Amino acid sequence: MKFKLAPLAPIALASLLALAGAAHAQPQTYKIAYIDPLSGPFANVGELMLMHTQYAIEDINAKGGVLGGTKLQLLQFDSKLSAQESQSALQAAIDQGAKAIVTGGSDSSVVTALVQSVARWNQRNPGKELIVLNHSSIDPEMTGKGCSFWHFQTEANTAMKMKALANYIKKTPDVKKVYLLNQDYAHGKQWASYGRQLVGLARPDIQFVGEALHPIGRVKDFAPYIANVKQSGADSVITGNWGQDMTLLLKAAGDAGYNLRYFNHSAGSVPGTVTAVSQAKRASSPGWPSGIRARPTRRRSMHWPRPTRPRRARTFSRRAST
């Protein structure tokens, strides 16, 4: 997914890009390949992180580059959310002289395949090693059993994020009935599983009143799913959706006038989602305290209310960031 585009990601990415440039001295330029979806249903996610990467590179170059003058050069490749396309992009990046790969806006299996391919390349080509800078793919296996020396992850993983949400839900008695609605692929199933385990452990009294998986990136109208959620009597939804699947889900709930809490890993980080939240009333993510309400005006612009308990909100944000 995964999801995940935290406010600190551009800062962490800039630091890693600088370190990457320092690790491989080049006389003139150090090439960095960006491999993420730039077309299809999740193009907005890829384009957003591309802008972050471009900003980081421009900032580093404006300050003189790395190693006393080596400038960074960005190469762009469209992964098309496909493992096969990503492997082709990786080979093209290598052929063009890339030394670092920036990725993360694809399925975790796609990013895992890239990390594995880079590890094999490095083993066969000593002195020409590449590194992978992962901004958003958050499968715990990538830093667990599948950990690679050549892989650097700037985002908290799925288990960490769900633990933060579970800690918050534990102190929120208004959350009583939860529906699990997720994308039908590895990340969505993992998010649902961790939701049941960690939230259930934190709040044994909570009822899980329903669960559904939907095709990733192919649902245009979530109204039928929202109808099922409403029929279940849920007051909250745990969803690992990201990109347009999150935006359209919230829009459908807003159109139906159904007021729910949403517990998600990166709800407010993609353009369009915040506007959808203004219609759906509430949303929660590990970097966004629960109970934030937004009300749409006639022009559908956003007006954020004054926080009634800022101390509590700050505490949640700190916990979610650890």
Image (spheres, rainbow, N blue to C red):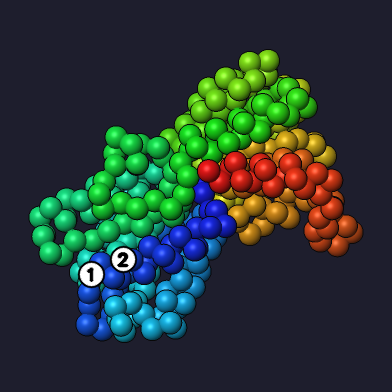
Question: For the point 46% across and 49% down, which residue is it?
Answer: 155
Question: For the point 26% across and 46% down, which residue is it?
Answer: 148
Judge by depth and name the residue closer to the eye, 178 or 156: 156
Q: Position of residue 186 (x, y in %)?
A: 43, 35
Question: For the point 16% across and 55% down, which residue is it?
Answer: 121
Q: Left or right: where does residue 209 sit relative to residue 321?
A: right
Q: Position of residue 97 (x, y in %)?
A: 22, 72
Q: Amino acid at mark 2?
A: Ala
Residue 20 is labelled as 2
Q: Left or right: where does residue 110 sit relative to residue 197?
A: left
Kindly indicate whether the residue at mark 2 contacts the one at mark 1 (C-beta within 8 angstroms). Answer: yes
Res. 290 visible in picture:
yes
Image: 208 above or below 288: above
Q: Amino acid at mark 1?
A: His
Which quadrant would residue 26 be assigned to in this image? bottom left
Residue 24 is labelled as 1
- Tell me the distance, in whole angstroms, between the alpha carbons under discs 1 and 2: 7 Å
